[in-house]
Amino acid sequence: MPEGHTIHRLARDHTRLLAGRPLVARSPQGRFAASAARLDGHVVERFEAYGKHLFQWWDTGEVVHVHLGLFGKVRVRPADGHGVLPEAPPSVRLRLATDTVAVDLTGPTDCSLGPPELRDRIVARLGPDPLRRDADPERFDAGVARSRAPIGALLLDQSVVAGVGNVYRAEALFVCGIHPERPGRELVDAERAALWATVVSMLRQGVKDNRIVTVDRAELGRPRTRVPRREATYAYGRDHCRRCGAAIARWQLANRTMYACPGCQR
DNA sequence: AAAAGATGGTGAC
DNA sequence: TCACCCTCTTTTG
């Protein structure tokens, strides 16, 4: 689930479901229990997404930082017909609840409470987030143009661009026709510009769909039918290129599995 | 039943 | 570069 689009979608959904009213805060799993007790009964004034990081601005003046990592998930559990919320499974690190809905967080890499400076320290390490209005594409441009690291590694580097993960890196490079092993500094201006524009539009689409679909709408069979995961990408997770049918190459790049089409990406 | 893997990241060397 | 953390699902035997 979690690349940047997931986090922005969570911020939006949580604002609607939870913001501005007193919340019940619990940590059945236990690791956030002391903090949850402090926050119980308080109000989240604002949910903020930055790259893959989610921040809750509480009325206590403190901030909760949530990072889903690879395994983290958020589940929304509405109350039943009698207004009773389902019991939280024991693995739930943090439950925030109103009278009508519970939002359960499991498996996050990080869930911690701290001062606003905590948020600033984290954001200071991040490159521009294509989903934020305040994103500066020139920072991305500079980060890529200066580096001899492969572009496939740079797209995963959160200090170069914040919010792109393994699926979007493969798909953005595919759409732009760029081979993942090319050093960043060898890309030409037009290629860097195309990459930025591509991640912006892919991530935006991801927020809308609440899932990753990188294949052009026009190439999807019937737009209303649900696209199976395997058909939602050009190269990622596939055996054969969705566009030309060639065997997809798959190897480790920056500790993750890279997928690329040898024909479509020179 | 066990193992492998997954859309992520850190810290130690 | 590697070990490791977090949880759950899918694949393998």
Image: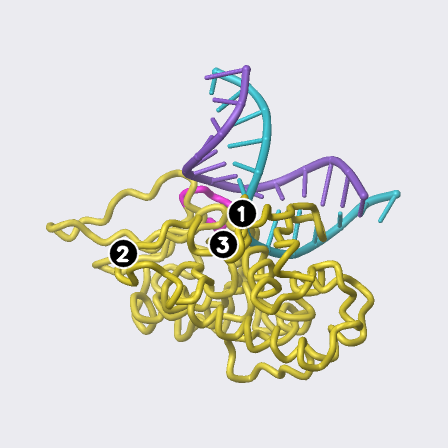
Chain colours: A yellow, B cyan, C purple
Q: Which amino acid does label 2 sit on?
A: Thr
Position of residue A10 measured from the top left corner of the image (x, y, whole percent): 40, 64
Report which residue position mark 3 lands on. Answer: A242
The answer to whether the residue labelled 3 contacts the one labelled 1, judged by CB atoms less than 8 Å apart, is yes
Position of residue A163 measured from the top left corner of the image (x, y, whole percent): 56, 66
- Secondary structure found at label 3: loop
Residue A142 occupies quadrant = bottom right
Instruction: Give the residue drawn at x 28%, y 51%.
Output: A77
Quarter containing the C terminus of chain A: bottom right
Residue A43 in sight in this render: no
Whole-angstrom CA distance, mark 3 to mark 1, is 6 Å
Report which residue position mark 2 lands on. Answer: A225
- Report whether mark 1 lies on the same chain as mark 2: yes
Report which residue position mark 1 lands on. Answer: A240
Whole-angstrom CA distance, mark 1 to mark 2, is 22 Å
Q: In the picture provided, is A164 more to the left or to the right than A266?
A: left
**Magenta stretch, overall SS:** loop
